[in-house]
Amino acid sequence: MPETKLISAQEVPVTSGQSLAAVFSGEPGSVQLQSIQTPVPQRGELLVRVIGCTLCGSDLHSIEGRRSVPVPTVLGHEIVGRIEQIGGG
């Protein structure tokens, strides 16, 4: 398995209206922290500030190249967060 490089969130600049996401591009062993546009919630949606997120075994298989997923993608679906905004309407 390729070696996975860990980097600190402090190494990625994030400006107002932006969020930080760990994006998997399909290259085994590579997950990149990227600054992305923070979405605006629409009617029936919530914007949640992620406090903690874990990767399950299936996510790890994807990172290791043993499971195919559409890319680019943000892995991790076991999330603890705080509601920041409720979509209008």
Image (tube, helix red, strand yellow):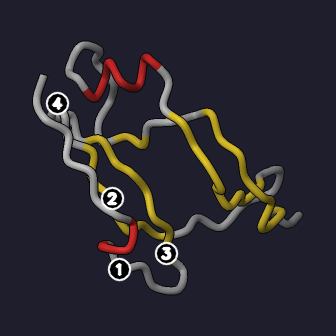
* Extreme residue in the top direction: 66
Question: Which amino acid is tagged 4?
Answer: Pro
Q: Is residue 7 found left or right of 46 in the rendered image?
A: left
Q: Residue at x 52, y 86 (%)?
A: 16
| Residue at image mark 4 | 28
Query: Residue 24, located in which quarter of the rendered image?
Result: top left
* Extreme residue in the right direction: 89
How far apart marks 4 and 3 lie (CA) works out to 26 Å
Where residue 21 sits: x, y (%)? 43, 57
Query: Residue 57, located in which quarter of the rendered image?
Result: top left
Which one is nearer the viewer's eye here, 2 or 27?
2
- Considering only vertical position in the picture, is 24 above or below 69? below
The 10 Å Cα crowd at callout 4, few under 14, some 14 to 19, many 20 or more, is some
Badge 1 marks a residue whose secondary structure is: loop
Q: Residue at x 27, y 45 (%)?
A: 31
| Residue at image mark 2 | 33
The 10 Å Cα crowd at callout 3, few under 14, some 14 to 19, many 20 or more, is some
CB contact under 8 Å: marks 3 and 2:
no
Instruction: Name the quadrant of the C terminus.
Output: bottom right
Badge 4 marks a residue whose secondary structure is: loop
Q: Is residue 8 found left or right of 47 in the rendered image?
A: left
Which of the two labelled residues, at mark 3 and mark 1, occupies the earlier sequence position? 1
Report the mark closest to the observer, 3 or 2: 2
Where residue 77 sits: x, y (%)? 58, 34
Q: Is residue 71 found left or right of 76 in the rendered image?
A: left
How far apart marks 1 and 4 lie (CA) works out to 25 Å
How far apart marks 1 and 2 lie (CA) works out to 10 Å
